[in-house]
Amino acid sequence: MVAAAQQAAPTISSLELFNITKRFPGVVANNRVSFEVRAGEVHALLGENGAGKSTLMKIIYGLYQPDDGQILLNGQPVTISSPQDAIARGIGMIHQHFMLVPSLTVAENVALGLKSSRGMRLDLDVVAAKVERLAASYGLRVDPRAEVSRLSVGEQQRVEIIKALYRGADLLVLDEPTAVLTPQEADDLFRMLRQMREEGRALIFISHKLREVLALCDRVTVLRDGRQVGTFPTAGMSRGELARLMVGREIAAPHAEDRAPVPVGPPLLQVRGLSSSAGAGGPALREVSFELSPGEILGLAGVSGNGQRELADVIAGLRPSSAGEISLGGAPLVGGPGERMAAGLSYIPEERMRDGAIMDFSVEENLILRDHTRPPYARGPFLDTARVSTVCRELITRFAVKTPGPQTPIKSLSGGNIQKVIMARELAREPRVLIAAQPTRGVDIGATAYIHRLLLDMRARGGAVLLISEDLDEILALADRIAVIHDGEIAAIMPRAEADPERIGLLMAGASTESLSH
Ligand code: ADP
Ligand code: MG
């Protein structure tokens, strides 16, 4: 028989970590961290990139052994030797990148790895029935016979959760689960998590979205540099307080309300009827049109993989279009990336490690990467090395890049500092139009605030910014107008003042405009 899903009352009443230390070569990832999660609570784990959150969770899930410290499950000391051991003890984990096999059905994925003594076929029927029942008990519809590759990201996440529950998870760790969801899908997830809390399960929710931590979680444990800042009830806490605990200093949030209005005038960037064939893992672009004025930030909202990447690549000259026109400052924007850059376009690509920087090069080499044949770096045909060195040092200071020096390999910097180097390079040439794709994804909160300020500075100087982001909060905070892209088409464009997150969420999910007016 297939191991039966547990329907009995949860067996985990508490999990405690005492003075857990975990070292990696050159870094103490967890430094005497203590943490406790109880049945019937959602406990947030909050911290900047590299704070030690995933390491601590991997210890709970049996993927790492601590160097020091103790784990108590229901008050008893335990050693969690492997994920199989963790699962047997009722601990489940939803990783940020799903572990499902796309070519298999939902039921096959759930059955995968379960012990079986009967024929696979019989088992699958049992599993399928059980999956349907489990899903229904959370008010979800999941087709156990659907192939996983055909499911949306939100649906795949549900399957992951169902799979963990099927294995009897009474304690569930979720690593940044909302990063890939629309606001509605996130609401559905929260509803499911609240129900699990009511059933008496223990939940650990990793997120860097302060609003979600406050909306969903009962307590929050904050990690900074591998150390525990503290554990606090979320009731009565503000986002500002949480941010300060996380970074150890005040973070100034941008205020969209008190900035200058967008000046009226001819558009800087015009995109008309732009179409392209499918590629880069996304759909074909279908007659995309929009305008960007000087001094304006246009936010492009959408679930990842709906054509954002294709659109940015086509405008930047990295991918051909099949129809349509682009103009910058009234002149056609044509040719390769170099020509478009010379015309005043800069591009911060989504995959910064692959497309934005050369990892084996130094910070300085990355700063001059696209401009080394032009002033100020070149004098005639020669690289002016003294000038390069001076300008790069200035850029490092001006853009607050934390690096031991200009000659440091860029790969040894944190994600946020790599992004600052790319921003420095792209903004130093004072572009008229900037495409910023997911500029703060995976970037810590301090660097995020800094990057937001750079975008607002560019706007204040009369530049135009196309801000492509999956983070709706970021778009709402920065954009003057908001466009929503779905399946390669612009579903709607609206002024920020008229933007309703719920409507945007529905558009992101592909709801047609007609169905919204009902
Ligand atoms: P977070 O999840 O909060 O972003 P992590 O737990 O992933 O942080 O990382 C904490 C620190 O430990 C970081 O400095 C990271 O580089 C380091 N680290 C994590 N895993 C490993 C590993 N397997 N080997 C070496 N260093 C690691
Ligand atoms: Mg992590």
Image (cartoon, grey):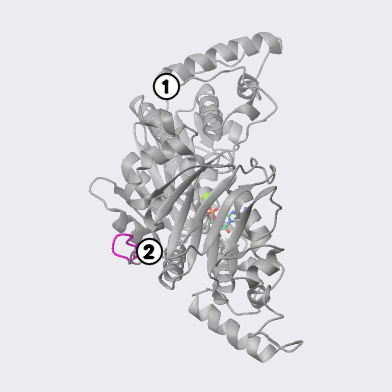
Say if residue 161 shows up in the picture.
yes
In the displayed structure, 262 sits above or below 127; it is below
Please tell me which residue lies in front, 318 or 370: 318
Task: Residue 96: name its quadrant.
Answer: top right
Q: Give the range drawn in magenta.
A: 250-259
User: On the rendered structure, is 254 left or right of 71?
Assistant: left
What kind of residue is marked 2?
Val
Q: What element carries label 1?
A: loop
Q: Is the magenta stretch mostly helix, strand or loop?
A: loop
What kind of residue is marked 1?
Tyr
Task: Residue 391: name its quadrant.
Answer: bottom right
User: On the rendered structure, is 312 left or right of 266?
Assistant: right
Please tell me which residue lies in front, 119 or 324: 324
Please provide percent x and percent y for residue 225. Answer: 47, 61
Q: Determine the residue located farthest toward the right in the rendered image.
A: 381
Residue under label 1: 138
Please tell me which residue lies in front, 374 or 59: 374
The C terminus - image quarter: top left
Q: What element carries label 2?
A: loop
Which residue corresponds to the image point at 57% horizontal and 51% vertical from the top-left? 272
- Residue 81 in the magenta stretch? The answer is no
- Residue 254 in the magenta stretch? The answer is yes
Please provide percent x and percent y for residue 297. Answer: 44, 60
User: On the rendered structure, is 244 left or right of 89?
Assistant: left
Which residue corresponds to the image point at 59% horizontal and 67% vertical from the top-left? 345
Residue under label 2: 262
